[in-house]
Amino acid sequence: MMSRDTTQKCFPAQVMPTLVVILTVIPALCGAVNVNCSEPNQPALLKALAPVFNMSAIRPVMNLTTPTIVNITFTLFGILGVDEKAQLLLTYLWLRYRWHNELVTWDPVQCGCDKLSLPRSKFWTPDIVINEFMDKNEVPVVPYLYLHSDGTMHDYHPARAVTSCNLNIYTFPFDIQNCTMTFSSYLHSASEIEVFLWGSQEDATQRSKKVITTVGEWELLEITAKKIDPRQDKASCMDELLLHVRVRRRANMYVVNLLIPSCFLMTVDLFSFLLPPQAADRSAFKMTLILGYTVFLLIINDTLPVTGNSIPLINVFFSLCLALMVASLLETILITKLLSSSADFSPMPHWIRVIVLQFLGRIVCLPQKPTKTTNIDVKPEVVKQTADYGSSEITVSSMDDKILQELRSLREEMQAICEQVEKHLIPSQSSEEWIQFSFIIDRLLFGLYILFITVSFMTITIIWVNSYSQ
């Protein structure tokens, strides 16, 4: 029977009522149970461990000021998926815990075995949880754990972990995610339970890569550990162990299904600049491409990630592609209007002439052409004089009024034809400038198309290579 002073030394005064009940069952709480097996077999060992089973309600230490060291590791058996919208990582884990039970030891030679599988309910187990858990663990509970002859206890059980993760999908589909799983006690402070990594982080990574069964969208890169030292007041904070899981998205499917078709449509739109700009087929062809690209974006809408954290770079790429297609269609409409109605436009402003005809024209290799005079064999003045002379001769010859009226009508028609010939064969300088403006803008947008496609291909290739080199 323990003395009052000895009891107060082993336990604080707050747990004295509980100890009164426990002391009636346990004859020597402050000392380890001496397991003596009558025979070297498991039934004899199980009978000798009966006093230990009665102490399942307390932490298995000789002194309450001694913390229980819990070693933790896990094997990543499968990556079930990533929910970008809800910011969740779904994994299947094999968890392994190890701690020391100071209240029990036995001689493996005397008892005939070194370890024994016993019901979990017979022992105290640490309340280690993953702080990032966002859903119930639907895996059945393993009802047994291992007890070794030196008091070491091993607890193995699976877990379907639905954990929160701050996902960064800016470089989708070449993104690499780093998700954290924080292991700590839910109830016991750092002065009671300390958490450490069992083994090395390299072993956890290699073991997970060896047994992982899911060959889906995500690939495991590495598992790293970080120990968070508790504050000076260990009685008021929990001891934590952070395990970081780095996974990489397999981008081959997205490159084939998203990026390559988009680049093909952009290339077809690029070669549409070889069609004559004044032809109506060019505008209809570009409108068909825009319609097809819009349908393509609607089809892949469910494939793209949806999150409010950041806008993926691939969404910006698709928006720029659609914007360039619309700009090329608008540019074709503008050029068709300029080429068909350039003679009706007012003279070009001076600042447009300087910026477009002189500056941009040299950049796109279309410098402004000098004004040329056109020689016309049949001049309108000669035709007019001939018509007047014929009219006077007819008047002198005293022909009847009907023939005179027809000749005057013929003279007016000839004058109109001369004006149209002068208008088309002798174009004004303003009309030539607007036509030159149209070809310069068409060549400029063609160059911007080539530059955009080249930069896009190079950027995609560089990001793709860098993601697989990490």
Image: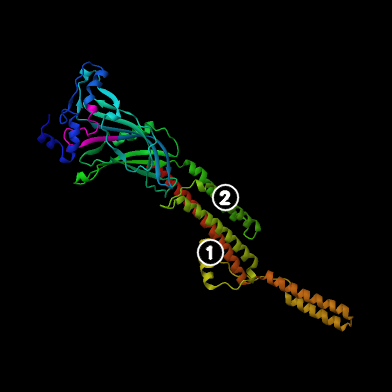
Q: Residue 252: horizontal and vertical position, in percent?
A: 47, 41
Q: Residue 266: horizontal and vertical position, in percent?
A: 54, 51
Overall secondary structure of the magenta section: loop
Q: Which residue is drawn at 57% across and 66% down?
A: 437
Q: How many labels does the image show?
A: 2
Kindly identify which residue carries mark 2. 295
* Residue 172 within the segment the image draws in magenta: no
In this view, 276 is above or below 64 = below
Q: Using the rendered image of the protein, determine whether residue 360 is visible from the camera's viewpoint.
A: yes
- Mark 2: few/some/many CA within 10 Å (<14, 14-19, 20+): few
Q: Residue at x 86, y 83 (%)?
A: 395
- Mark 1: few/some/many CA within 10 Å (<14, 14-19, 20+): many
User: Under tag 1, what secondary structure?
Assistant: helix
Q: In which quarter of the image is the N terminus?
A: top left
Q: How far apart are marks 2 and 1 (CA)?
A: 37 Å
In which quarter of the view is residue 405 placed?
bottom right
Amino acid at circle 1: Gly
* Residue 55 within the segment the image draws in magenta: yes
What is the magenta range? 52-72
Q: Using the rendered image of the protein, determine whether residue 259 is visible from the camera's viewpoint.
A: no
Q: Which of 289 and 70 is in front in this view?
A: 70
In which quarter of the view is residue 146 placed?
top left
Q: Which of 426 and 323 is in front in this view?
A: 323
Mark toward the start of the polypeptide (2 vs 1): 2
Q: Residue 21: horizontal and vertical position, in percent?
A: 20, 33
Q: Nearer the viewer, mark 2 or mark 1?
A: 2
In this view, 397 is above or below 293 = below
Q: In this view, does 398 lie to the left or right of 411?
A: right
Q: In this view, does 45 lie to the left or right of 136?
A: left
Q: Residue 275: horizontal and vertical position, in percent?
A: 62, 55
User: Under tag 2, what secondary structure?
Assistant: helix
Kindly identify which residue carries mark 1. 361
